[in-house]
Amino acid sequence: MKIPFYTWFVKLPEKINNEKLKISFKQAFPYWIASLITGLVAVLYTKLFAWSEALSGFIFAKQPWLIFIITPLSFVLAWWIVKKYARNARGSGIPAVMASIELATPQTNHLVNKLLSIRIIIVKILSTLLMVLGGGAIGREGPTVQIAGSIFRKVNQLIPASWPKISKKNMILTGAAAGLAAAFNTPLGGIVFAVEELARMHINNFKTAIFTAVIIAGLTAQYILGSYLYIGYPNVTNPSGYIFLLVILVAVISGFMGAVMSRIIIKIMRWKRTVKVRGFELMYVISCAMVIALIAYCGFHSVLYSGKKEMVDLLFNDHKYGGWKLPLLRILGPIASFTTGASGGVFAPALSAGAAIGSLVSEWFSLIAANANILILSGMVAFLTGVTRSPFTSAILVLEMTNNHNIIFHLMLAGMIAGMAAMLVDKKSFYEHLKEQYLHEVRLENV
């Protein structure tokens, strides 16, 4: 006779004789289960995302004219699924998790279900897959964070009443860290992200939970996908002494432009909410799709997808110079994609935009490959910092993606300078603005 999983889940800790060990096990067990599920879902999502992008690229290469049909249709379906079934599955997902952490109190905990749920997971995955099938310049990393937060939230809700209480806020936060770690294969990045971007507080009370969750989710993904670097191991050996000065220049430009892109997206989203014309949302989505399709059809394919291909090409090919058009395309693509209201993240697109700016500055000074790679990586850190205002998270993520520990000071300098440059454009981060919008809408729905 088979024992139901839920019964096993509840009864297993009761077999432990030591009382202290039993309590500790009961407190840790839900984190382990949620982390394992997160790792498995992250792997499946990664594979589906890659397959959708590959299928899209194959179709557009064979029959370029189909982009004018597939892109608008995919964008509209991605937007409609979100609008119809889970409005809070739109966009990146990180602001929704930030809002959930703030709402996870006894007074407002019931509102978290509007932001984190099984429905959110399903809609999030479907919408992003449709967007990337249409060539949308989006990433899967932010969505993975909301998916992971939803998984941890659901596991938390299944904990028996007789068990020791586990903080709902800590559970969500730990899930977000595990999700980012599994998405990028960057365990340190997941931990730093939880502390710098989500918690913004002392973490002594739940540091063990974060560490174990990140390890389990990351190892699960790594066991299935294999040990890999998100980007690879670019050559940055023997950099010139003056490179720090150019890192500062790249950081200023990239940080500033990251904040500008964020500001434009926020302005467009606010403007859209003021327009009350019937059918306007649909027409806007179609317009964005057609703009991206037209640009790509004219030969500028860098406007499509997450931008990972562009990052890899710049870092590992002999030709390090992408030209002045590449940064514009890598900024325009996310603006047109993100403002549709469908699901999709900005982490990977921000990294690719920063890489393009680093490449452009390298071209200005005709740098050798190693120096150019340092500027490309610094641009990635800086642009992401301009969006998120989380310099340490950005630096650690890029560091772990490339395993280049010898340039950690270059990356940290880029993040620090970029944060200051971004403040000239907007005092708040992109995610802070969106978090406030989520909080406003969820509380308004509850009135």
Image (tube, helix red, strand yellow):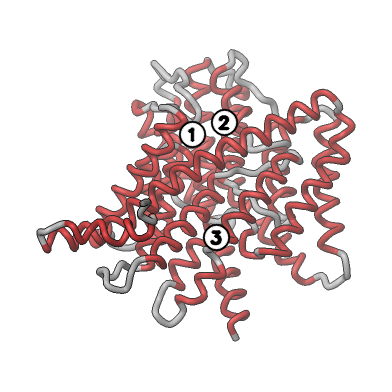
Callout 1 secondary element: helix
Q: Earlier in the sequence, mark 3 or mark 2?
A: 3
Locate residue 367, reporting x and y percent.
54, 18
Which residue is the site of mark 1?
Answer: 378
Label 1: few (<14), some or many (≥20) within 10 Å? many
Residue at 89 percent of width and 32 percent of height: 65
Q: Nearer the viewer, residue 439 or 115?
A: 115
Left/right of residue 279 with respect to residue 410 in the rendered view: right
Callout 3 secondary element: helix
Q: In the image as oriented, which residue stretches furthest toward the bottom?
A: 447
Which residue is the site of mark 2?
Answer: 358
Please report contact status of discs 2 and 1: CB closer than 8 Å, yes or no.
yes
Res. 118 mark: 3
Locate residue 313, reporting x and y percent.
60, 22
Residue at 82 percent of width and 36 percent of height: 295
Dividing the picture into quadrants, the one containing residue 241 is top left
Identify which amino acid the numbered label 3 is placed on: Ile
Please report contact status of discs 3 and 2: CB closer than 8 Å, yes or no.
no
Q: Nearer the viewer, residue 278 or 430?
A: 278
